[in-house]
Image: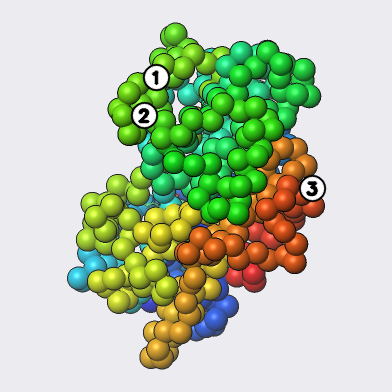
Amino acid sequence: MDKHFKIIIVGGGSAGISTASRLLKGMKALAKEVAIVDPAKNHYYQPLWTLVGGGAAKKEASERTMEEVIPEGAVWLQSAVASFDPESNYIKLTNGESISYDYLIVAAGIEVNWDGVKGLKAAIGKDGVCSNYSYDYTDYTWEVIRKFKGGNAVFTHPATPVKCGGAPQKIMYLAEDYFNQSGVRNQTNVFFGSANPAIFDVQKYRDTLEKVIVRKKIDARFRENLIEIRADKKEAVFENLDTQEQTVVPYDMIHVTPPMRAPMFIQNSPLADEGGWVDVQPYTLQHNTYENIFGIGDCANLPTSKTGAAIRKQAPVVAENVLALLKGEPMKAQYDGYSSCPLVTGYNRLVLAEFNYKKEPTESFPLNQALERRSMYMMKKDLLPVMYWDGMLKGIM
Ligand SMILES: Cc1cc2nc3c(=O)[nH]c(=O)nc-3n(C[C@H](O)[C@H](O)[C@H](O)COP(=O)(O)OP(=O)(O)OC[C@H]3O[C@@H](n4cnc5c(N)ncnc54)[C@H](O)[C@@H]3O)c2cc1C
């Protein structure tokens, strides 16, 4: 064994960093005993990418170096995890090292599968094919929207779990709003091809969004899954998930939300459930088989929407429960499935969806959050990034 840590956290994203901060705040003796394993040089506040694609923020504001966000007292191992051996309590890194642990927290996010749509990988980033689902392409989304001269503007939502279930439609609402400002809306068809059965799965917010779709005259089709981009002909091919019928939709611009999946090194490990996600208990976030392993964030099989907002409520639960086990106490903290989606419906308009495992609204403010509000848009744009960098990542909120 090359090294040993009391706690190893796999992934230094939203979940890994906020959990590490809370652990180190909760028990001073853990200094230098918490390792964060992540090969990435940079850390991203991905929720900003919607606004970057809509021209309302700069992508550089979503990026910090990993060194800047790793909390004091944590040790950063800059390598990727290759495999897990949960029976013997160690992980193998791609740099060849084996590291053992007392407790393991898996927070490796979700993998964007650019190969999951035929022709997408070759087409992305040029000739009107854009996506907010990568730092590299977010500003190209804005270039496409800004320069759009009319025609078919196509937006997609895949048939897999995605990070932030609302993001595929938020950029469409911003684009539609911008097309009005730039004077091309009258010569534009806005088409939404979504593999989902409806626009949103919490009824209260769905009612509002259905009205938004009608008001904006968006041609929204459900159970339609993008399977191919024919970049040479500027055609998108959708397959109906019920009838398997294929429809070819010509595009002048297309914003693609690619299919996503659990990271392969998790899928191929004993930690995975049958879908490939880290198999955890939904309330304690403890692994269903290995008591000294926890899963958090986008890589966990929690039956709720995969968002940073959800992680804000998951991180205190994981940290508290791991600290309890370290002290030989029973685990008391419970996660209720809280997730939130700030549904941007235009510049200066936002519906703040908040809900739990039962898909019941669990709203934070004493007002009807299903209404589109300017105050909520300002909160997303100006307040939430500060809360993220200075609060959530530091284990304060
Ligand atoms: C366009 C877009 C809009 C969004 N909008 C919102 C929003 O409005 N509100 C909201 O709450 N959320 C939103 N999200 C979702 C939010 O960003 C994610 O849910 C959140 O970042 C997930 O955190 P995580 O820690 O699970 O994964 P990530 O933050 O993605 O971090 C995963 C980390 O694991 C590391 N890793 C991967 N493989 C390995 C390995 N083999 N070994 C070690 N480390 C590894 C990666 O390098 C990465 O640093 C949005 C996301 C996108 C893309």
Badge 3 is on which residue?
374
Who's the residue at 41% across and 46% down the image? 161
Residue beneath disc 2: 240
Name above or below for residue 292 compared with residue 180: below
Work out which quarter of the rendered image holds the C terminus and state it. Answer: bottom right
**Quick check: can you spot residue 363?**
yes
Task: Tell me the element at label 1.
Answer: strand
Classify residue 68 by image quadrant: bottom right
Q: Mark 1 or mark 3: which comes first in sequence?
A: 1
Can residue 54 be seen here? The reply is no
| Disc 1 to disc 2: CB gap under 8 Å | yes
Circle 1 residues within 10 Å: few <14, some 14–19, many ≥20: some
The x, y position of residue 241, in whole percent, is 34, 33
Q: Viewer-proximal residue, 378 or 159? A: 159
Marker disc for residue 247:
1
Q: Give the camera-side residue of 229 and 188.
A: 188
Which image quadrant: the N terminus? bottom left
Badge 2 amino acid: Asn
Label 2: element kind: strand
Q: Amino acid at mark 3?
A: Arg
Q: Position of residue 164 (x, y in %)?
A: 53, 48
